[in-house]
Image (cartoon, helix red, strand yellow):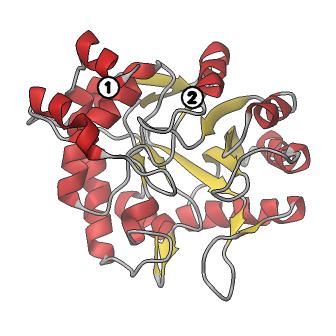
Amino acid sequence: MTTNTPTSAGTFLLGGDLRINRLGFGAMRLAANSLHGPSRDPRTGIAVLRRAVELGVNHIDTAGFYGSGEVHAHELIREALSPYPEDLVIATKVGPLRDEATGIPSREATADELRGLVEEDLRRLGLERLDLVYLRVGGLGPIGGESIAQRYGVLAALREEGLIRHLGVSNVDAAQYAEAEAIAPVAAVQNHFHLQHRDDAELLARCAALGSAYAPFFPLGGGNRPLDPSRYERIAARHDATVAQVALAWLLALSPVMLAIPGTGSPEHLEENMAAADLRLSEEDLAELGG
């Protein structure tokens, strides 16, 4: 595959009023390869962001806790892209807090702390209003089992104040999604989902029925559910593509509400990911992939 235009993957109307390309960019790996890895050269991150926008990316997913050392995704985004293109949608997440001892975002913000996190994101990104704010719940363990009403209600109030345009929820189960939806519209869900981790299929279908976007984290594997590339090499070879491109193309083919946000700190890897927008899987491919 030689082309790399995110616009080829189609668009989605986020929250009913923000038209974005379904293939976007995740900022987690801009500053470091992991949440506790060594910092990357910030000049590379800036170059990746500018190239992503050149290629047609108009949806960037970030978080205040994405960073390592003195290098952080928010600041890279602001330096690389501000003043922002008119059609650029920046999504962020609030909830996790870094542990002072380990530096890992293992603590969870209380309802009283959420306003401060939103205001900090506004300041660091240089924005007057955030396009999309997810309430990120819990860690990487099993999801569900707790009420999110109080915390989501705080974000809903900030939306009414005009600090937030649209709300989302991340790392939630169906009950938590319904709990949030009863308080204020859920424009997007961000849960763990990929080719070999499909436990969230029912919630994806619920999002499709209600018009919420679904933007999976770890779309190419990661966390405690890695992707086994050897299972998909034959399909990739049929298209002169990479396994990562097949995995992204499968996500985009699965549902019209699916938003793919692969992340990288590498210019070369960015080009590879963006080329997935032009990959069209056949019925045979989809049957072999099981979806």
The residue positioned 33% from the left and 46% from the top of the image is: 228
Direction bottom: furthest residue: 101
Q: Which one is nearer the viewer's eye here, 12 or 103?
A: 103
- Classify mark 2: helix, strand or loop: strand
**216 relative to 178, above or below:** below
The residue positioned 77% from the left and 42% from the top of the image is: 159
- Classify mark 1: helix, strand or loop: helix
According to the picture, the residue beneath numbered tag 1 turns out to be: 9
Residue 188, position as x, y percentages in the image: 62, 34
Could you tell which of marks 1 and 2 lies nearer the N-terminus? 1
Q: Amino acid at mark 2?
A: Ala
Please rate how many residues cluster around mark 2, counting C-alpha atoms within 10 Å: few if below 14, some from 14 to 19, many from 20.
many
Residue 195, position as x, y percentages in the image: 41, 35
Residue 55 seen in the current view: no
Residue 63, position as x, y percentages in the image: 57, 59
Residue 236, position as x, y percentages in the image: 17, 33
Q: Which one is nearer the viewer's eye here, 53 or 248?
A: 248
Q: Answer whether labels 1 and 2 touch (C-beta < 8 Å).
A: no
According to the picture, the residue beneath numbered tag 2 turns out to be: 213
Q: Amino acid at mark 1?
A: Ala
**130 relative to 179, above or below:** below
For residue 43, side relative to residue 161 (left or right): left
